[in-house]
Amino acid sequence: ATMPPLLSAIATAGRHGVLVKSAVAMERLGAVDRVALDKTGTLTEGTPKVTAVHGDDAALALAAAAELPSEHPLARAVVAEARARGLEIPEASDFTAEPGRGVRAVVDGREVRVRRAAGTHTDTAVEVLVDGSAAAVLDLSDRLREGAPEAVAALARLTGTPPALLTGDNAGAAARIAAEAGLTDVRAGLLPHEKAEAVREWERAGAKVLLVGDGVNDAPALAAAHTGIAMGRAGSDLALETADAVVVRDELRAIPAVVALSRRARRLVV
Ligand code: ADP
Ligand code: MG
């Protein structure tokens, strides 16, 4: 027997490094006409580095203590910078994470918070507060993924609409990555529920949205979208469960390839 077109498309998608979870998911991919991409871990590699510490090593060590249990890419960068400087990371307790905002913990009886820095920045910036007073600002930077501009251009061609960037990061960092990737529709400073709200707004206006994310603070948006694709390597377990497809090799160019594949398969299904 010949393989049904959607199953055969799933096999081909697998060779492109995309795990499509079902024939239904394979079919949905070809219906999308609007694409939104998350920034950190999706358009970017998701391995930011601390590029400057405006403050002393003690403040950095406190920030690292509060970030230690967090799985956020920025948290890993802060901890890595403290270790690279040979700092001793003090013991902390009472950790809380505020998704899309930052973290909080208690270190030596003091409350340490690491969160989005206020003010205007040209890249990612977080501030460290100790007992409510500003102790440091950390600048961070992440690299655009290879193949991002090509993937963005191909998705624009396929859907007839330029893809949008959705991010919780500040407007300066968003603008930098958007310019590198060739995106002009940018929404910055969004909390996780606001990313989902942006998706729902487009869907209410009649669009079928494809959301590409890594599941760190974009799981609600992945769930709200007509179709969700998770970046596999950086992707959280939640994202891998919520998404219709997983980009296993983290190759952004595979995304327009599977949308095109789905469209071809749909034409063969009658
Ligand atoms: P993105 O949309 O780029 O994937 P997130 O929604 O995960 O970003 O985070 C948005 C912003 O919230 C970050 O740019 C940062 O300023 C702040 N933030 C989130 N989590 C943390 C954390 N663990 N430590 C410091 N800042 C954080
Ligand atoms: Mg993200």
Image (cartoon, rainbow, N blue to C red):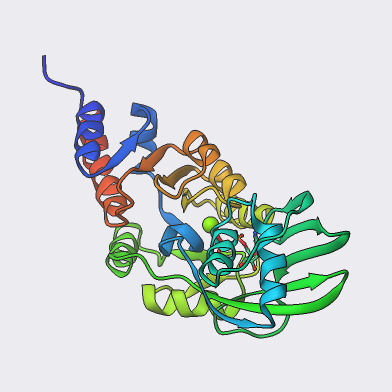
- Residue 234 is left or right of residue 206, and the answer is left
Foreground: 141 or 111?
111
Q: Residue furthest top?
A: 1
Query: Percent x, y for residue 190?
Result: 65, 64
- Residue 149 is left or right of residue 199, and the answer is left
Q: Residue at x 35, y 63 (%)?
A: 160
Q: Residue at x 23, y 43 (%)?
A: 261
Q: Quadrant of the C terminus?
A: top left
Q: Residue furthest left?
A: 1
Q: Residue at x 22, y 44 (%)?
A: 16
Query: Percent x, y for residue 88?
Result: 64, 64
Query: Percent x, y for residue 51?
Result: 52, 79
Q: Residue at x 46, y 44 (%)?
A: 228
Foreground: 95 or 259?
95
Q: Is residue 225 above or below residue 115?
A: above
Foreground: 56 or 190?
56
Foreground: 137 or 23?
137
Q: Is residue 231 above or below residue 25?
A: below
Query: Percent x, y for residue 123?
Result: 55, 79
State whether residue 119 appears in this view. yes
Q: Is residue 21 above or below residue 91?
A: above
